[in-house]
Image (tube, rainbow, N blue to C red):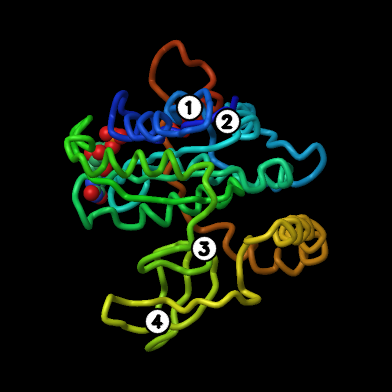
């Protein structure tokens, strides 16, 4: 029996994201059990950019629930993630977890190409902003085989399935999870399926997911993106990921070599400013204001 991990990025219980994940899972033809994680239930701190997770024992040093999350991803056979659009992008809980993704580089072979489906739920058609790109990148850094990322619309909890077409889409996504990948269709990158492009000049575009460039031409049925795989391509093969890990690890040595030169720059920005920091609570029970500030600060960074 396969284990499916459903990642619900919305804090809303029985909200659209939760329903979508469950409906997709219901339609997976393969025998499976569904395990759910609501990101809001986890305490995940922001990445500290220390790079320690890239070196033996290849674990993040922070004591929080990220490892629990990663363990569940590692144990899963397939992944479904659904995130709500908040202010033109996937909500921040998704990015908070994604930012810890350097810790995934310790498990490249185990994570590589687990089948995955992503869904963004937005309230208003056309107001999803960068949600598609956000979900694509989240799944890319979990090193999954992204079968499809879709945007569905619905505002009130449950509303997403007032529209029968969305039920049908969820069913198709369920069937797609373990099926062979279909070639990218429509106005998407033919290499990776991304649908967000940067114009480099009048006709040259870059796919914001795989970083490959190419041209865009207009046809009777709409724009076609002739993107070609090139040296700038990002993380599309296992070898590429392993090479990227080595490159990341080499930053430590580079830092040691460049440390003094870098200091001549950074020291010029050390003083002459005031940082705004939260005040320690005036609660009479708090005696050590330093500890209280840092506790309040880290509390503010918790996901829950
Ligand atoms: C803080 C907040 C910001 C939102 N911003 C957008 C937005 O920019 N565009 C949009 O189409 N919908 C937006 N929505 C609507 C949600 O995407 C929509 O209600 C979605 O169904 C929520 O999913 P859920 O039920 O799983 O929480 C926003 C909702 C909230 C709470």
> Quick one: quadrant of the N terminus?
top right
The location of residue 126, given as percent across then percent down, is: 22, 57
Q: Quadrant of ligand 1?
A: top left
Label 1 or label 3, whichever lies nearer to me, is: 3
Which residue extends farthest top? Answer: 285
Which residue extends farthest front? Answer: 29
User: From mark 4 to mark 3, how far is it between C-alphas?
Assistant: 16 Å
Q: Is residue 34 left or right of residue 131?
A: right
User: From mark 1 to mark 3, how far is it between C-alphas?
Assistant: 27 Å
Q: Label 1, on which residue?
A: 37
Q: Secondary structure at mark 1?
A: strand
User: From mark 2 to mark 3, how far is it between C-alphas?
Assistant: 26 Å
The location of residue 238, given as percent across then percent down, is: 71, 56
Q: Using a 10 Å C-alpha cutoff, classify the residue at mark 4 as few (fewer than 14 neighbours), some (14 to 19) or many (20 or more).
A: some
- What residue sits 75% from the left and 69% below the top? 261
Q: Are marks 1 and 3 in contact (CB under 8 Å)?
A: no
Q: Are marks 4 and 2 in contact (CB under 8 Å)?
A: no
Q: Label 4, on which residue?
A: 216
Q: Up-down: is 126 above or below 114?
A: below
Q: Earlier in the sequence, mark 4 or mark 3?
A: 3
Label 4 or label 2, whichever lies nearer to me, is: 4
The image's mark for residue 69 is: 2
Q: Are marks 2 and 1 in contact (CB under 8 Å)?
A: yes
Q: Is residue 238 visible?
A: yes
Q: Up-down: is 101 above or below 283?
A: below
Q: Earlier in the sequence, mark 4 or mark 2?
A: 2
Q: Earlier in the sequence, mark 4 or mark 1?
A: 1
The image's mark for residue 192 is: 3
């Amino acid at each position: 029996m396969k284990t499916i991990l459903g990642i619900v990025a919305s804090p809303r219980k029985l909200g659209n994201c939760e329903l979508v994940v469950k409906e997709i899972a219901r339609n997976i033809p393969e025998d499976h059990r569904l395990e759910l994680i609501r990101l809001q239930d986890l305490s995940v701190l922001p990445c500290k950019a220390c790079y320690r997770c890239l070196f033996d024992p290849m674990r993040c040093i922070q004591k929080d629930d990220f490892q629990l999350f990663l363990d569940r991803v590692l144990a899963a056979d397939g992944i479904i993630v659904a995130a709500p659009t908040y202010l033109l992008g996937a909500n921040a809980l998704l990015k908070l977890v994604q930012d810890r993704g350097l810790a995934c580089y310790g498990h490249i072979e185990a994570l590589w190409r687990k089948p995955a489906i992503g869904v963004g739920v937005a309230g208003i058609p056309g107001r999803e902003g960068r949600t598609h790109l956000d979900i694509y990148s989240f799944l890319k850094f979990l090193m999954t085989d992204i079968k499809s990322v879709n945007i569905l619309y619905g505002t009130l909890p449950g509303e997403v399935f007032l529209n029968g077409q969305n039920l049908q889409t969820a069913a198709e996504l369920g069937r797609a999870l373990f099926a062979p990948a279909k070639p990218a269709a429509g106005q998407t990158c033919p290499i990776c399926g991304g649908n967000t492009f940067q114009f480099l000049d009048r006709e040259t575009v870059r796919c914001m997911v795989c970083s490959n460039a190419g041209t865009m031409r207009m046809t009777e049925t709409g724009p076609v993106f002739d993107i070609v795989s090139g040296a700038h391509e990002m993380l599309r093969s296992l070898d590429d990921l392993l090479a990227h890990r080595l490159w990341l690890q080499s930053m430590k040595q580079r830092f040691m070599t460049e440390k003094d030169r870098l200091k001549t720059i950074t020291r010029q920005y050390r003083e002459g400013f005031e940082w705004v920091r939260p005040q320690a609570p005036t609660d009479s029970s708090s005696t050590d204001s330093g500890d209280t500030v840092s506790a309040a600060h880290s509390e503010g960074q918790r996901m829950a």
